[in-house]
Image (spheres, rainbow, N blue to C red):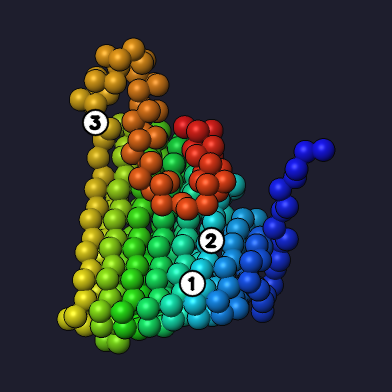
Amino acid sequence: MKNQQKRAPKLRGAGIHVRDSESIEVTETSSLTIDGGARSTILISPKKDCKVAIHSGKGCDISIFVIQDKRVSLELTNYVASRSVVRTNCFWRFGGEEKISSILVGEGAEAHDTSVFIEDDLSELRLDSRLVHKAPNTKGEILVKGVVKGKASARLDGMIRVEKGGKGAVSFLAEHAILLDPASHALANPQLEILNNYVNSRHSASVSRIDEGKMFYVMTRGLDRKSAKKLLTEGFLSSALERIQDESKRKEFEDEIERTL
């Protein structure tokens, strides 16, 4: 008999309590509270527009995965307590208005947010990524990487805010997109709002066409233009996928990208 991977139970509604080593799936508006010290995995697969709030206890290690399988809008807010680490990994491909926020409310809290997107046809993505340092000695980073095809468009709004109590914060925001077709459009808009002088916060952004020099080089190795473009696109997205620590989930993201490209 083949070994079958145990599916995460689907939970919904307010006041969900998540215990150590528990994996759950959330499909609609919900509020989750994670036990202190827990190691948990949360899969968010919204079936309609929804809001999800996740409150970690102290010393948690939480992995969150969002894979969009239809055009819905999600507002996800992570409240990260002292010494907790929350990693949020998202894949967008059907447009919509998405907002991912990590609020570091406890000393020593960390948040690592990664979004990958591939928009095609006439889809329109608006992605708002936010990182808020409220407590001292917190760390965070946001990486957004994506591809726009056809007549699709993407607007990437990013914000790092360090509040007065965020002394010692270390954070980085990066938003990068490549355009594969003449009618493709993208805008990257990273911002910093710093209310404490004793921090290290940086940002970077770029929107560019695919590099024709690299295309030519790859095609001289025997690939046609379509295959060369696909290879370069996968290489562009690889640095974001490498941040996914769970190998099975990383493979799932890679498979979704393979199908979408």
Q: CA distance from mark 3 to mark 2?
A: 33 Å
Residue type highlighted by circle 1: Asn
Estimate the x, y position of residue 135 in percent, counting from the top left: 35, 83
The residue lying at 53 percent from left, 41 percent from top is 251
For the residues labelled 2 and 1, say whether their Cβ atoms are less than 8 Å apart. yes
- Circle 2: element type: strand
Frontmost residue, 260 versus 70: 260
Judge whether residue 56 can be spotted in this image: no
Which circle marks residue 64 in the picture? 2
Quarter placement of the N terminus = top right
- Circle 3: element type: loop
Frontmost residue, 1 versus 177: 1
Q: CA distance from mark 3 to mark 1?
A: 37 Å
Question: On screen, 158 above or below 185?
Answer: below
Query: Which class describes the residues within 10 Å of circle 2: few (<14), some (14-19), or many (20+)?
Result: many
Which circle marks residue 211 in the picture? 3
Residue type highlighted by circle 3: Asp
Question: On screen, 240 above or below 25?
Answer: above
Q: Closer to the N terminus: mark 3 or mark 2?
A: 2
Residue type highlighted by circle 2: Ile
Frontmost residue, 188 versus 258: 258
Q: CA distance from mark 2 to mark 1?
A: 10 Å
Say left or right for 185 vs 27: left
Say left or right for 36 vs 207: right
Estimate the x, y position of residue 67 in percent, counting from the top left: 55, 50
Query: Which class describes the residues within 10 Å of circle 1: few (<14), some (14-19), or many (20+)?
Result: many
Which circle marks residue 78 in the picture? 1
Quarter of the figure with residue 217? top left
